[in-house]
Amino acid sequence: MSDSPQPRRPHFGFTRRGLPVHESALDHLAPAPGAGAYARFNAWLAVKVTKGVGSMSCAYIFGAIALISLPAAISTHSVIILVSWVAQTFLQLVLLSIIIVGQSVQTQASDARSAKTFEDVEVVIDRLDTGTQGGITEIMTAQQKILDAIAVSQSGERGERLRPRGERT
């Protein structure tokens, strides 16, 4: 019995290059085959820290922490200290979390669009497969019937088609 966890089966299969296409980023936690417990732990910890820091709750906490030092910065009556407080304390602490939240929202929307596109492409490929009932098979069958009907009708009208319009014999 192996002590390494079994990788999850990719929700959307594999790319042409053999890379797994998972539904969720968490499913990509399983590192490359052969990677040890250390690599798995690093991937798990990175996701946990990013989820924790990348929340609006964390942004509010960071904002409150930054505001604690605001009275000291104001009491110096120095523009440089105030600008430094805004740039180095408030913006860095608060914007870090807000940017991560925004990226998470954008990633979820992008993942949903990618999944929909992938599913649509699968349907199109299935419809274009001549071995599949329906889709292009029905169109090709109908087209062949029309071509056969045209060929039959043209074989009996060849003589008439050569005469210019308006001429009667």
Image: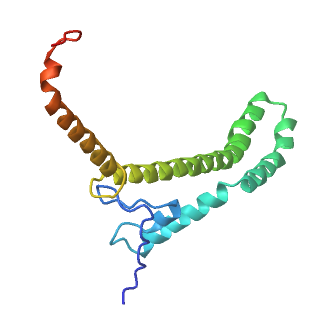
What residue lies at 65% left-to-right and 50% top-to-bottom?
Answer: 101
80 to the left or right of 147:
right
Vertical placement of residue 141 versus 168, above or below: below
Query: Which residue is outermost to the bottom?
Result: 1
Q: Nearer the viewer, residue 99 or 113?
A: 113
Q: Nearer the viewer, residue 23 or 73?
A: 23
Vertical placement of residue 62 versus 9, above or below: above
In this orientation, does residue 152 appear?
yes
Q: Position of residue 2 (x, y in %)?
A: 37, 86
| Image quadrant where one finds the C terminus | top left
Q: Position of residue 150 (x, y in %)?
A: 22, 35
Query: Which residue is outermost to the top?
Result: 166
Q: Position of residue 40 (x, y in %)?
A: 45, 70
| Image quadrant where one finds the N terminus | bottom left
What residue lies at 15% left-to-right and 14% top-to-bottom?
Answer: 163
Q: Nearer the viewer, residue 122 or 49?
A: 122
Q: Position of residue 77 (x, y in %)?
A: 85, 31
Q: Nearer the viewer, residue 158 or 44?
A: 158
Vertical placement of residue 29 versus 82, above or below: below
What residue lies at 34% left-to-right and 56% top-to-bottom?
Answer: 15
Chosen colour scheme: rainbow
In this orientation, does residue 128 appear?
no
71 to the left or right of 59:
right
